[in-house]
Amino acid sequence: MATKADNTGAFRRYVVEFFGTFFLVMTLCMLDAGDHRQFAPMAAGVMLVAMMYAGFHISGAHYNPAVSLATYLRGKLNSGDLLPYIVAQFLGGTLAAMLAGFLLNASGAPAPAPKELEIVPALIAELLGTLLFVYVFLNLTTIKKTAGNIYYGLAIGFTLMAIIYTFADVSGGAFNPAIGLGITMANFTSWETIWIFPVANFSGGVLAAFLSQYVNGPEA
């Protein structure tokens, strides 16, 4: 039977996941719609670095449903936490997109025209970007040989920045179903292609989990 302390600890983890995802999506939405959109990948990477170091010791700092699924497949996340993590992340991304829209409308910023995604290229870009991101995340945070390293936040944040710069023109640069929902709500991509993000991102996360397990061996 779960104790009150257990329930409190679990709720704290979900709050951290909500909080980190919220600010990650907020950063992308606010900058993509403004005059400094060229800095959006850099800002998102730096924000993720900050949120990684702020929340890793509490929740593992996933901020991404694909990461949570992959971490669960690696046996590093309890089954009882998987769905609450994903719900908290989607709620954080949804609220961030709504608030960003309100703030941008209040500032008089012009509404963005949604990017029309080419389905096959976007699927490939999101799959590859998510595969790399989740692979790096797992190898730095779930492997015994890298346990206790101090550089994980920087490496993971810079990986996000690199894949956004690499693939954003093709797919919108989500690599995270919660971000995919957020940028769609913010009108950066079309609702007609929103399915690309969960399909490609969750598939990339699953592939990353198996790749990480394979290259690190059964003792990882």
Image (cartoon, helix red, strand yellow):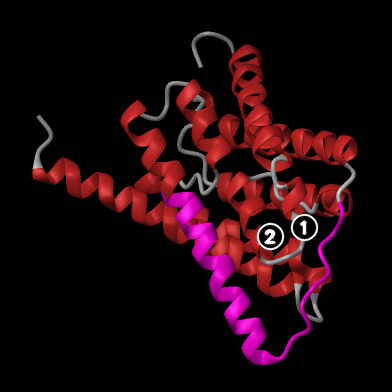
Q: In the figure, is residue 34 to the left or right of 216? A: right
Residue 176 lies within the magenta run: no
Q: Is 49 or 127 nearer to us in this picture?
A: 127
Name the residue at 68% across, 33% down: 199
Name the residue at 60% across, 83% down: 103
Residues shaded magenta: 88-116
Q: Secondary structure at mark 1?
A: loop
Identity of the amino acid at label 2? Answer: Ile
Name the residue at 77% across, 57% down: 189
Residue identifier under label 1: 189
Mark number displayed over residue 183: 2
User: Looking at the image, is 72 positioned above or below residue 65?
Assistant: above
The numbered mark, 2 or 1, whose residue comes first in the sequence reads 2
Quadrant of the drawing holding the N terminus: top left
Q: In the figure, is residue 211 to the left or right of 74? A: right
Identity of the amino acid at label 1? Answer: Thr
Residue 154 in the image, given as x and y percentages of width and height: 62, 52
